[in-house]
């Protein structure tokens, strides 16, 4: 019996698989498609997702492939109106934010990096395996999978559906998406080669009649992502094709000397905004698009799925090695409200962009697509059962908040950073001043006596700060250690 079966090998499923594999959990990843996806689809990796990538050991690989601060060039037909960095600006650089700006990188490249990392950790993706049925009893989940050679039955302690908006796992678990179909917001999408346009910037045309046309150069490739809104009055839009895209470009842009060719992927996309009201049915969990489908406003969908996986992975691993299964209840408690807020925010941004398109104000639309919220750095779990809030006044960084990075000088006089201490599957206890705690099991203890770290964590006296495996503060003081104890093997009496 495998411990965790993951259905779907997109960014969400791969993140979860990497996190479980590095914790020594026996995991299988099955993917319906016979070949790796090549369509660009999502292309924004937010700062918080880059922090997850840092923890998984792949941030530098992603940064080497992608680009930050890509300018947007606005046109009036063939005339250039403006050029500036307007979208995905991120937050102001600061020691607490090692990755202040979003990274532009197409989803297939992100997935390839995660697959490579999974391979390094001893795992792999099993392609051409379609989930047919999911059933469960008190001890395990039974999944039937169609393979190239027949039907396979897989027994797993837990199953996670990361299989997208048409999730079979969701259907079989009896969970449903609820939401809204925005029939008037439709887009032509595609990946194609373009001759005659600079690759250092995004090219955008907006008009009240036609809406938005965008050609975005995908970093690390020779391909542009084509996006064109379909006018609301077009009741029966034509099927997407390279010929249609060339005609749209000629009609809306008309820049001479530009040729669109070699379309590797085309799609007619309609915006749906929906989510489940439960993330779990017994031993079956949902993550990513299987649980919530967002508008593209703010570049949130893929990133929210990665955060789902990062939240769930360490909890599944803890339960599988003996922690109280009640720990898994915190996954839905923490992530469902986040999905709801992100969904509402991305929908509002979508409406703003479409209104701006109607006004022909491209710069306004681009500037308001992203902000501090969309970076993911402000997401917090203050009401979680895993957040121990003391009785004193709220601190600038408190239980449930993201644990910021900070640069400091270690005991040997060498420059160091907190994220280097956090990297890995462990809990981290920062001990300030003379407070002493013994390391135990998954708890790593680091004595810190640095003014920069004290400022970053609002520490004024001797104090303990407990950081969860996913980089959020569990709490302050010795009482916060009870949160860690609740995640340990219930058959052991491990107390530092």
Image (cartoon, grey):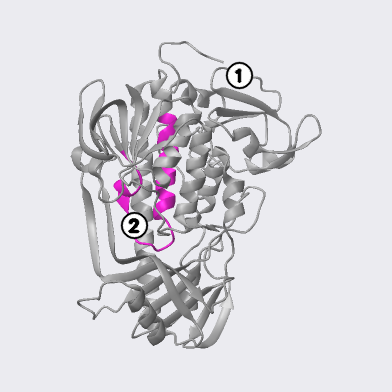
Q: Nearer the viewer, residue 485 or 172?
A: 172
Q: Residue at x 29, y 70 (%)?
A: 186
Q: Which mark is residue 133?
A: none
Overall secondary structure of the magenta stretch?
Answer: helix
Residues packed near mark 2 inside 10 Å, few (<14), some (14 to 19) or many (20 plus)? many
- Relative to 383, 467 lies left or right: right
Residue assigned mark 2 = 294
Q: Is residue 157 magenta?
A: no
Q: Nearer the viewer, residue 145 or 88?
A: 145
Task: Name the outermost residue toward the front.
Answer: 149
Return the disc, 1 or 2, that comes first in the chain's sequence: 2
Residue assigned mark 1 = 439
Please identify the quarter of the rendering in which residue 91 is found: bottom right
Residue bounds of the magenta highlight: 286-315
Q: How far from the left and from the top, in percent, is residue 260?
A: 44, 76
Q: How far from the left and from the top, in percent, is residue 25?
A: 43, 25
Q: Is residue 290 magenta?
A: yes
The quadrant in which the C terminus is found is top right
Q: Is residue 262 visible?
A: yes
């Amino acid at each position: 019996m495998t411990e965790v079966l993951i259905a779907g090998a997109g960014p969400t499923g791969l993140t979860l698989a990497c996190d479980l594999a590095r914790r020594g959990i026996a995991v299988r990843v099955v993917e319906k498609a016979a070949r790796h996806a090549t369509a660009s689809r999502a292309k924004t990796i937010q700062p918080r997702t880059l922090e997850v990538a840092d923890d998984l050991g792949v941030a530098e690989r992603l940064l080497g492939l992608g680009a930050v601060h890509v300018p947007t060039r606005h046109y009036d037909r063939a005339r250039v109106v403006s050029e500036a960095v307007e979208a995905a600006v991120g937050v102001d650089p600061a020691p607490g934010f090692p990755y202040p700006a979003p990274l532009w990188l197409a989803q297939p490249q992100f997935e390839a990096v995660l697959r490579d990392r999974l391979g390094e950790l001893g795992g792999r993706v099993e392609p051409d395996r379609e989930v047919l049925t999911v059933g469960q009893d008190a001890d395990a989940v039974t999944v039937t999978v169609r393979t190239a050679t027949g039907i396979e039955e897989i027994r797993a302690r837990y199953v996670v559906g990361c299989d997208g908006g048409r999730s079979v796992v969701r259907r079989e678990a009896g969970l449903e998406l609820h939401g809204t179909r925005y029939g008037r917001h439709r887009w032509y999408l595609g990946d194609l080669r373009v001759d005659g346009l600079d690759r250092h910037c995004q090219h955008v045309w907006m008009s009240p009649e036609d809406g938005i046309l965008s050609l975005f150069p995908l970093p690390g490739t020779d391909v542009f992502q084509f996006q064109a809104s379909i006018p609301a009055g077009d009741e029966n839009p034509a099927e997407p094709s390279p010929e249609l895209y060339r005609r749209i470009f000629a009609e809306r842009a008309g820049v001479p000397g530009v040729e669109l060719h070699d379309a590797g992927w085309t799609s007619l996309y309609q915006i749906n905004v929906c989510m489940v009201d439960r993330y779990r049915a017994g031993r079956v969990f949902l993550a990513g698009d299987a649980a919530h489908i967002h508008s593209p406003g703010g570049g949130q969908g893929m990133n929210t799925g990665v955060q789902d996986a990062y939240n769930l992975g360490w909890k599944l691993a803890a339960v599988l090695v003996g922690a109280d299964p009640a720990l898994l209840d915190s996954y839905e408690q923490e992530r469902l409200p986040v999905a709801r807020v992100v969904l509402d925010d991305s929908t509002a941004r979508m409406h703003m962009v479409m209104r701006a398109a109607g006004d022909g104000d491209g710069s306004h639309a681009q500037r308001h697509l992203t902000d501090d919220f969309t970076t993911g750095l402000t997401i917090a779990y203050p009401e979680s059962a895993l957040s121990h809030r003391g009785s004193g006044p709220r601190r600038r960084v408190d239980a449930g908040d993201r644990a910021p990075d900070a640069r400091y000088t270690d005991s040997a006089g060498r420059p160091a950073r907190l994220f280097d201490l956090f990297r890995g599957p462990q809990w981290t206890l920062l001990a300030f001043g003379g407070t002493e705690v013994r390391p135990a099991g998954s708890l790593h203890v680091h004595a810190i006596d640095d003014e920069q770290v004290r400022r970053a964590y609002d520490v004024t006296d001797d104090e303990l700060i407990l950081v969860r495996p996913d980089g959020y503060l569990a709490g302050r003081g010795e009482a916060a250690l009870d949160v860690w104890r609740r995640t340990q093997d219930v058959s052991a009496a491990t107390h530092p």
